[in-house]
Image (tube, rainbow, N blue to C red):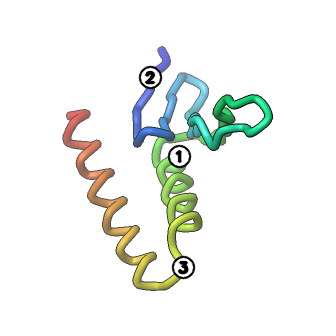
Amino acid sequence: MSRSIKIDESYRVETSTTGCSLILDKKGEVNPKTGNPIQVFDQWFYTDVKACLKKYCALQINLECSSIQEVISKIEALEKKIDEMKEIRL
């Protein structure tokens, strides 16, 4: 049985009997030639949800942080988000 867990507007984790996937699926910038938004899609495969969430955290830190203080703040925000996700799932 497959299950999907939304992390934010762009990322979700999908679980199945064979493992888990972290999926990035969002509309990007508008293509000036077509006038349509560019669809951004990427997928990473792991054995469990914890590994998917570690990858998500690493991606968020790499994309958004340029100093140690920003890394610490981002980690704290991500920990809070994960705790909230746990509460919703219980």
Three-letter amino acid code of the residue under disc 1 = Cys
Q: Residue furthest bottom?
A: 68
In three-dimensional space, the C-alpha distance between marks 2 and 1, rounded to whole angstroms, equals 14 Å
Percent x, y of residue 13: 49, 35
In three-dimensional space, the C-alpha distance between marks 3 and 1, rounded to whole angstroms, equals 23 Å
Percent x, y of residue 36: 67, 29
Q: What mark, if any, has residue 3 been given in the picture?
A: 2
Tell me which residue sits at (48%, 36%) in the image: 12
Looking at the picture, tell me which residue is in the foreground, 66 or 43. 66
Which residue position holds label 3?
66
Give the SS element for disc 2: strand
Percent x, y of residue 28: 62, 41
Q: What mark, if any, has residue 25 been given in the picture?
A: none
Q: Earlier in the sequence, mark 3 or mark 2?
A: 2
Q: What mark, if any, has residue 52 been given in the picture?
A: 1
Give the SS element for disc 1: helix
Q: Where is the C terminus found, in terms of image quarters?
A: top left
Of badges 3 and 1, the one in the foreground is 3
Three-letter amino acid code of the residue under disc 2 = Arg
The answer to whether residue 5 is left or right of residue 57 is: left
Q: Residue furthest top?
A: 1
Tell me which residue sits at (41%, 32%) in the image: 5
Percent x, y of residue 76: 32, 68
Tell me which residue sits at (56%, 34%) in the image: 20
Q: Is residue 56 above or below residue 29?
A: below
Give the SS element for disc 3: loop
